[in-house]
Image (cartoon, rainbow, N blue to C red):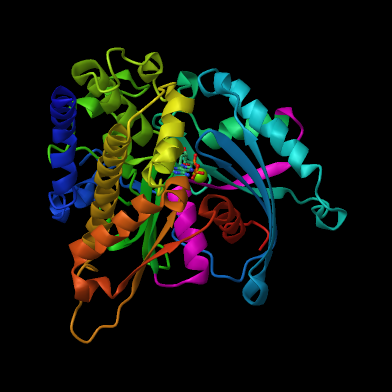
Amino acid sequence: MAKIILGSAAALTAALAAAAVAGHHLKVSGKWGHAESLASDGGSKLKMLISYVDNLPSGDEKGLFYALDLGGTNFRALRVELGGKEKGVVNVDSEEVSIPPHLMTGSSHDLFDFIATSLAKFVSSEPEEFRPLPGRKRELGFTFSFPVRQTSISSGTLIKWSKGFSIEDVVGEDIVGELTKSLERVGLDMCVTALINDAVGTVAKARFSNKDVIAGVILGTGTNAAYIENVNAIPKWHGLLPKSGEMVINMEWGNFCSSDLPLTEYDRALDEASLNPGEQIFEKIISGMYLGDIVRRVLLKMAEKADFFGDIVPDKLRIPFILRTPDMSAMHHDTSSDLRVVGKKLRDVLEIENTSLKMRKIVVELCDIVSVRGARLAAAGIFGILRKLGRDTVKAGEEQKSVIALDGGLFEHYMKFRTCMENTLKELLGDEAAETIGVEHSNDGSGIGAALLAASQSQYL
Ligand code: ADP
Ligand code: MG
């Protein structure tokens, strides 16, 4: 028993130490490199991409708009009816389709044809009264949540894939061009008027109903953030000065990396085995696609080096991504006195029978360590944005409020993650400044936000 405790303690030490300091290290905004990448592309690990969204929805938008949300393992088609100032979002119909795994690493032609075909099926359920007038096309906002270098509000080239996707033939190509070709192939009369990602969509959706919103953060399969920047602070913007004086910046913060990040041997091994080694390091220690797998990797080491599960190393523990973040979250939230849920998950997912209460407690502690680190780093990222904008302190005589809109399955469902993130943000801000900062869940920014932007960019309004 002593060996088990000692061994597991050693395996946990690195991650534990890391979790304790994560956040504080990154408190200084200079360390993030926001300004460097706003000055020139490649100035820092943050891409700080120009979204071309300089005109957020005003609330006056009216009519029927479509949206397509592609970001993780599913994509969704939405039909959104907007009723202008009085009525806002009147109705939303949507359909979710899971993407067959072989299409995530196949050819772009196949992926986009699959999307266009599913979209066409969805459009065919459109009520008669919403059919476009003769000579008009349906308008679509496309949320494509991968790093894209925009060339206009409705075009942009893919920089690289992330999360589970890897389709080489489309890297460097115009995403809207690819989708449009597929829409034509399936005979769907629709034009893409806005190309955005989920973080930008979250800003748009949240800002539609709350003018204090300054940033949107996604914590889902992956992670990203977008915020509203003053154009004068974007030296690399050479276009016309927008009337609003503002521009939404897509940070692509998932790609952040720094020697200040508390990386462990588990993170390095996960990164090496990933589809995109060396990239999206911040994402790989924070987001839903990876947290469960970090826990699996630590458990495997504990099994191998400390006989944590007895003499045999459970086979299933060697399978990447077998332990998913929702499983981890379920174990972490187990409130039963004998940690029944933990026992059941270990048995059902990993085929580990007869665990002791002591073992189950250590598993919960591990889930805590891994999620606390991710949550504290996410809070540090938000704090970095606030500091960049000078909103991390209270200025005498000013009553400025700043709201951060959050979305994504991890934020929505992993309560301990969410609470820890919100508490860390307060801790980093201090009591007085924390009073001026709000965090709100902005549901479905990636879907409705795209429809809103399609509307505000409409050629018919
Ligand atoms: P996407 O990021 O792919 O657009 P979502 O925002 O719905 O999709 O996020 C899905 C991700 O959220 C999943 O990959 C999973 O990691 C995480 N997630 C979903 N449910 C839970 C849960 N109950 N606990 C923890 N994480 C969850
Ligand atoms: Mg999403």
Answer yes or no: is residue 95 visible. yes
Split into 4 quadrants, where in the image is the N terminus? Answer: top left
The part of the image, by quadrant, that contains residue 109 is top right
- Closest to the observer, 54 or 125: 125
Question: Residue 434, percent across and down?
Answer: 25, 71
Vertical order, 138 against 159 (above or below): below
The part of the image, by quadrant, that contains residue 80 is bottom right
Identify which residue is drawn at 12% across, 37% down: 259
Question: Is 100 one of the magenta-colored residues?
Answer: no
User: How many marks are shown on the rendered structure?
Assistant: 0
Identify which residue is drawn at 15% across, 32% down: 9
Side of 186 where 268 appears, left or right: left
Question: Residue at the bottom extreme?
Answer: 397
Answer yes or no: is residue 52 visible. no
Identify which residue is drawn at 62% across, 75% down: 85
Question: Residue 12, percent across and down?
Answer: 18, 33
- Closest to the observer, 405 or 55: 405
Question: Residue 264, percent across and down?
Answer: 18, 30
- Closest to the observer, 109 or 302: 302
Split into 4 quadrants, where in the image is the C terminus? Answer: bottom right
Question: Residue 328, percent across and down?
Answer: 39, 37
Side of 257 where 65 appears, left or right: right
- Closest to the observer, 55 or 284: 284
Question: Is 198 one of the magenta-colored residues?
Answer: yes
The part of the image, by quadrant, that contains residue 8 is top left
Side of 356 where 461 appears, left or right: right
For the magenta stretch, what is the residue range?
Answer: 185-212
